[in-house]
Image: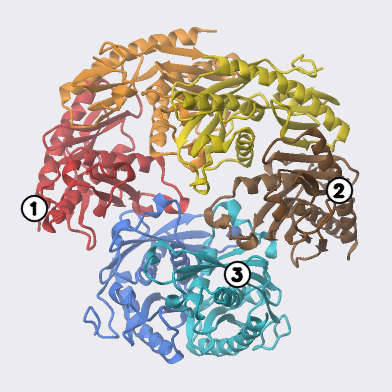
Chain colours: A cyan, B brown, C yellow, D blue, E orange, F red
Amino acid sequence: MRPSGRAHDQLRTISLEPHFSKHAEGSCLVRFGDTHVLCTASVDEGVPRFLKNTGLGWVTAEYGMLPRSTHSRTDREAAKGKQSGRTQEIQRLIGRALRAVTDRAAMGEKQIKIDCDVIQADGGTRTAAITGSFVALHLAFQHLMQIGALKTMPLTDHVAAVSCGIYKNTSVLDLDYAEDSTAQADANFVLTGNGGIVEVQGTAEERPFAEPQFMELLALARKGINELVALQKAAIAVK
Amino acid sequence: MRPSGRAHDQLRTISLEPHFSKHAEGSCLVRFGDTHVLCTASVDEGVPRFLKNTGLGWVTAEYGMLPRSTHSRTDREAAKGKQSGRTQEIQRLIGRALRAVTDRAAMGEKQIKIDCDVIQADGGTRTAAITGSFVALHLAFQHLMQIGALKTMPLTDHVAAVSCGIYKNTSVLDLDYAEDSTAQADANFVLTGNGGIVEVQGTAEERPFAEPQFMELLALARKGINELVALQKAAIAVK
Amino acid sequence: MRPSGRAHDQLRTISLEPHFSKHAEGSCLVRFGDTHVLCTASVDEGVPRFLKNTGLGWVTAEYGMLPRSTHSRTDREAAKGKQSGRTQEIQRLIGRALRAVTDRAAMGEKQIKIDCDVIQADGGTRTAAITGSFVALHLAFQHLMQIGALKTMPLTDHVAAVSCGIYKNTSVLDLDYAEDSTAQADANFVLTGNGGIVEVQGTAEERPFAEPQFMELLALARKGINELVALQKAAIAVK
Amino acid sequence: MRPSGRAHDQLRTISLEPHFSKHAEGSCLVRFGDTHVLCTASVDEGVPRFLKNTGLGWVTAEYGMLPRSTHSRTDREAAKGKQSGRTQEIQRLIGRALRAVTDRAAMGEKQIKIDCDVIQADGGTRTAAITGSFVALHLAFQHLMQIGALKTMPLTDHVAAVSCGIYKNTSVLDLDYAEDSTAQADANFVLTGNGGIVEVQGTAEERPFAEPQFMELLALARKGINELVALQKAAIAVK
Amino acid sequence: MRPSGRAHDQLRTISLEPHFSKHAEGSCLVRFGDTHVLCTASVDEGVPRFLKNTGLGWVTAEYGMLPRSTHSRTDREAAKGKQSGRTQEIQRLIGRALRAVTDRAAMGEKQIKIDCDVIQADGGTRTAAITGSFVALHLAFQHLMQIGALKTMPLTDHVAAVSCGIYKNTSVLDLDYAEDSTAQADANFVLTGNGGIVEVQGTAEERPFAEPQFMELLALARKGINELVALQKAAIAVK
Amino acid sequence: MRPSGRAHDQLRTISLEPHFSKHAEGSCLVRFGDTHVLCTASVDEGVPRFLKNTGLGWVTAEYGMLPRSTHSRTDREAAKGKQSGRTQEIQRLIGRALRAVTDRAAMGEKQIKIDCDVIQADGGTRTAAITGSFVALHLAFQHLMQIGALKTMPLTDHVAAVSCGIYKNTSVLDLDYAEDSTAQADANFVLTGNGGIVEVQGTAEERPFAEPQFMELLALARKGINELVALQKAAIAVK
């Protein structure tokens, strides 16, 4: 029995609220249950130095948590003067995930900066961030097409993410904080709309896990991500 | 004529949404028109070193802006590794304003940390932050009373803030970004519910201003703050 | 009765010693009683990026305290690796004050960097710094005129500053440290030679103050600043 | 055909040189072909604060590259004043991998700090570092047993790591730099001596990969890690 | 011929102004010609951690330059967020020089922090700083004796410093900036009142120098330091 | 009697292993007994800004210690976020020493970056680093000549370094850690192959030392450096 009463293969209540921000070219407030992440996509004319004159664009991401998004207050990274290793891992992951479905030649020498800011955290912030960022990125590209700065949509597929884990010896989908903090193992899966694997990160917390267990988690992730992609399609269709 | 069509002594649409955060002991999402600030109050057992064994408590504040809360994207302070001078000025101001209406002996050796995070900016973020933080602080103290950690409410009065400025030679209340960026002078006023002056910060942007003009701005601020205090009272009464 | 025996509307002994530095284009050692601040103005060909090709110049300021300028030793900011919020507030204030009387088109695309270093502190370092910096800035512009780099003096008026406060229920002018550390309220006023208000910063330390009290402080400031401007004129006239 | 002429399931020449350091309680110079990493284990009496009085020990790791370990020189992180996101990811991974085979209750309230410093890099530094660190950690625990500070060996299994990838449409074991920089996908596997999965990190570089491909990589990793564990056993047996 | 017209073995005009600071326990403004350094000595009850419960005291030094103490403005180290290698070298040198004549057992578990701040620079700031710091330190110890916190003077000898160099093929004493910037070689000597060598730092700028030249510089230094020690004695005698 | 049993004028066993690194243009692993330092020379097209268009090249050095190169573990500078004063002193010294024998006009507008990384420390790391860096630098210049990027060897002489000290009242050559940590005085000498003095740094640890003692140390250094230069010549001759 899961603390939330969910079935083992059931996502939390998901919502994707597009056009949340007045200023950003693309934005989406994503909610995986009580985990709320604001994703914005900002267009930046000009690419990092290593891409100058290559004809290729770039998509990069930054991630942050509001200090009291967490159960007890976390020190503000801007006040501490540096980003934690965890923050850097997550923002690198988000950037890689989005670039995996972006045709960087089609977007030209532009940069899209994704900001994922956790307003409230209850487990799974990185997977929510990837899922919502895709919507924000899509909307930003739509905007560039509408103003004539792009001819074609540079996205080649959808990308979404979800965590799975072994909780009380059972494989479950979309861990919330209560599950995550006591899971025996957990894995984050980033898959495309077509089911391709973009990124897999599995970690045994308590003791190593066996291959069949890992396969179970992957199967759960496929189910969840199919549902997330359907919700992304609906969100993108909103005017 | 103001860009927003408001009368010269008219606030933007204000909303104070209490209990916004699942985790914080007190919280309030404050909106001054398109300026949206999330204010949380976190209780911390234990005071800064200089207050150990004095019997006095402390209220302090931190302030931040989401990178794309602004018209064009602002670099993330956590990524730059330091907070700007502006950020530090604002968070010091918020802390002073709240302490001015707090009986620090009555709260005992506790610390309340206020976090003001700007979700969307359209001018006046610091005055919105002070106004909303008062509600978050009040709710945190209420919480401490409900759990028996405090006997009496340590707040001695309300405190709220608003900006005024000289825009196209007219004194106007509650500048939005369109006005703020071209105002000839502006001033932030922090007043108590009883009308006492807690803080005044007036700055001539373009050319010095004269005493009667300054008095006009103060009078507008009084009117606006009376309205804000009424809204604070309504917000605090929400269960 | 004031600790120093001064009348309530009496400045400390003020001295402005121009041409103090062998190297700087303009300099002034300012003394407000035991508060001693060295102000230098350094000419820098080239403006900050946001002013490139605008035809406008820039005046900016930095502020620091020698570690043992204070009653007990303060940690060196260079050793701590960052400037405090207080330092940043003060240096931003000095820069704004000087720019308010500078015709930035007349100075052309140049930058003047003001350094205010507190050699000894006894209250009122920021107001002394503004008052002395004006002299240093004036001398630097004079120097630029003498070498033919400027045709006209880009300063449109004098600017000086003084603090006032409520000490033992009496409004007093030019607080020294003994007064400042126990004042009920204090305010810093930055006024021009013509009496225009450039900046007002009033803060209630202990309890909010009322509008008539605030007016009293402003009147005291006017008197003090008239005297300071007269001393500036004398200092500038020194060859 | 691989650039090195290796078979698709062939490791590079591996060497594990124990007792490399005169000072460290445990040490191992590990070579995966031209990738050379010095791993040291330093015993620290005293655990991080969050483990005080829990009876549990801690194993943590730090990672660095000498500036000219790489093909072209990389800036020194100590000179830049911060560790890159990549460095932080890797050192977190090494620490997790080692803790997964450590009985932290059996080691008591001690800390072992692992330092992995890349002397020369040619791909796969993180997997070499994990494989060599296990030897250094084992030797440090042996040392603690010899001096009577530990009764039993707190390691519950071996742990080793290897990378696999899809290079020119073929799944290959133990990527060197020439392969890594052009691989279509790569994955790092951290497995125990008993074949349990500790960590899996798969990333599609160019386009998403399919589940059967991922299974192929895992099978290659199993083969390679069996060989690495055999070499670890030989290294640990050296006096 | 030296640019200043001095004889090859002639110091600049030296002045040592004791009791310069209102707040510090010991202080001295030292002038070597146009090089002016304010040296303060601050008493700190409590020693660095490595000296706790050893019965030994500590003397340490910090060094800084005002931004416009130099010919052209130098960036402020507090604004850059770190101290240069040069600054760190100099402050370590000053601390070692003073400790060499301090009986740290006699001073007990106290710390004296020396601050050397360059008000104006014209070459030789580190040697001026050592010479002036000795006076400040002596006065601080005198103060501690007067208030009964020390029974005996913990200084075992005088210490002073001077630079010598090879300028236009001639060995000269006490280089000023004009000489220093073009010298073929220069050396800083720190000697005691009794002529003992505390520190020698010789550096060939342009081409290596020979042993007899080095001996010439040392002889010049002895002469200069005898004169500096006599001035220190006079300064210390001032009430 | 020295702890190592060496004669007072005897170096430790020295080895200079050229071409140690696969990637660097020049490299040398230098061993002074148990002190092992890896020196690499990296060619960088492009000089620091202050040398642009002067026709002159630059040689600079960085220094670091692996955390467990020392008897007990030293915190990693990259993790602390800054280099210590000692590190900066040493790297400045290495750079100056190498530049003293480099004809910077002959090398043209190129930069060579020397990295000296201490693999294992047992006293004398800075002198070993200078001695080994010369070999690395020489090999890098040889490489530039072989590829036709330089016509002539820009080195004008050899340079090597050794420490001497007063240990138990006896002058000894090449202090190891056991001697260094208890020496009464020590000095580092940097001399050229022709016997010219490039740098002398003598420091009295316990009490000042006299001129004849200093001369004894210099004589020992000459002997040692002659031997080191002979070993450099042999190392450079290795293909």
- Name of the residue lying farthest toward the bottom: D212
Point out residue D33 in the picture as x, y percentages from the top left corner. 25, 72
Q: Badge 2: few (under 14), some or many (20 or more) residues near its Cα, within 10 Å?
A: many
SS under mark 3: loop
Camera sees residue D154: no
Q: Amino acid at mark 1?
A: Ala
Circle 2 SS class: loop
Residue F161 percent coordinates (x, y) = 21, 39
Point out which mark residue E27 bears: none
Residue at the spot of label 2:
B155
Asked whether F164 or B177 is in front, the reply is B177
Q: Are marks 3 and 1 in contact (CB under 8 Å)?
A: no
Residue occupying image coordinates x 35% and y 77%: D229
Q: Are marks 1 and 2 in contact (CB under 8 Å)?
A: no
Verify CB contact (< 8 Å) between mark 3 and mark 2. no
The vertical placement of E114 against B172, above or below, is above
Residue at mark 3: chain: A
Question: Mark 1 and mark 2, same subunit?
Answer: no
Task: Give the quadrant of the C terminus of chain A.
Answer: bottom right
The picture places residue A152, in percent across and down from the top left corner, at 50, 81
Q: Amino acid at mark 2?
A: Leu
CA neighbours of label 3 inside 10 A, class few (<14), some (14 to 19), many (20+)? many
Q: Quadrant of the N terminus of chain A?
A: bottom right
**In the rendered image, is residue D98 in sight?**
yes
Chain letter of the residue beneath label 2 in the structure image: B
Splitting the image into 4 quarters, where does residue E178 fall? Answer: top left
Residue A25, disc: 3
| Residue kind at label 3, given as amino acid type | Glu
Residue drawn at the location 89% of the way across and 47% of the way down: B193
Q: Residue at x 44, y 47 (%)?
A: F82
3D distance between C-alphas at marks 3 and 2? 42 Å
